[in-house]
Amino acid sequence: MRKLIGIVMCVVLWGCGADPFPKPKAYLSLNYPKKEFRKLPVKRPYQFDIPENTEIKDLPKQWLKIKYPALKASVDITYRPVQGNLRELLLESEKLVLEHTVKADNISYINYFNDETKVFGKLCEISGNAASQVQFHVTDSTKHFLKASLFFYAKPNYDSIYPAVEYIKKDMIRMMETCEWTTK
């Protein structure tokens, strides 16, 4: 009996350390490449900086796909000449953003103006499990209209892809800020 009491006392004293507390939440440790940029390597009516760690897929109609292989994502670039149809192009661009309202938690807009380069546009950020989390369009309002949309090659789970969205969103902002029209 003494042995049993001794064992119980040892277990009780050994188990009476610090007060238990819940462990802190763990976060995924994601490492993204350092940002380095280069000019778009293909001839287009537009020009902007793109990240070094991307691949370019040349498409018909002056369109492009800027691929992020490590992130399983792409920024799809569509270009259309303005031919008296600017209102139609702007409405179409807005419609493509609003199609995500079914899955979106929020849609926020940032207007962009650069009088020097004649580049005017809007960046749209779509939070939630939408198909595209970031889109922008830019135009000179007379000849050029360019639209960019971010897509991931997986079913969207906003919590999981959020760090990648933020990483690529900065690249898309750089694309807007460095956009120039190569044909006047």
Image: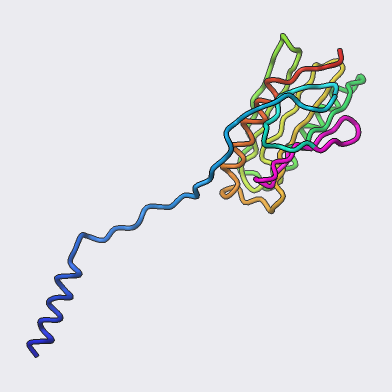
Q: Position of residue 126 (x, y in %)?
A: 65, 38
Quadrant in the rendering for residue 180: top right
Inspect the magenta stretch and tell me whether residue 72 lies in it. yes
* Residue sitting farthest toward the top: 116
Q: Which residue is painted at 71% across and 39% down in the image?
A: 150
Q: Position of residue 9 (x, y in %)?
A: 12, 77
Foreground residue, 174 or 124?
174
Q: Is residue 74 above or below residue 85?
A: below
Q: Position of residue 86 (x, y in %)?
A: 85, 22
Q: Position of residue 15 (x, y in %)?
A: 20, 69
Q: Which residue is painted at 62% across and 51% down in the image?
A: 157
Foreground residue, 16 or 131?
16
Q: Is residue 11 left or right of residue 173?
A: left
The magenta span reads 57-74
Tell me the quarter of the image containing the C terminus. Answer: top right
Inspect the magenta stretch and tell me whether residue 125 lies in it. no
**Badge count:** 0
Q: Is residue 8 above or below residue 32?
A: below
* Residue sitting farthest toward the left: 2
Q: How is the image coloured?
A: rainbow
Tell me the quarter of the image containing the N terminus. Answer: bottom left
Quadrant in the rendering for residue 70: top right
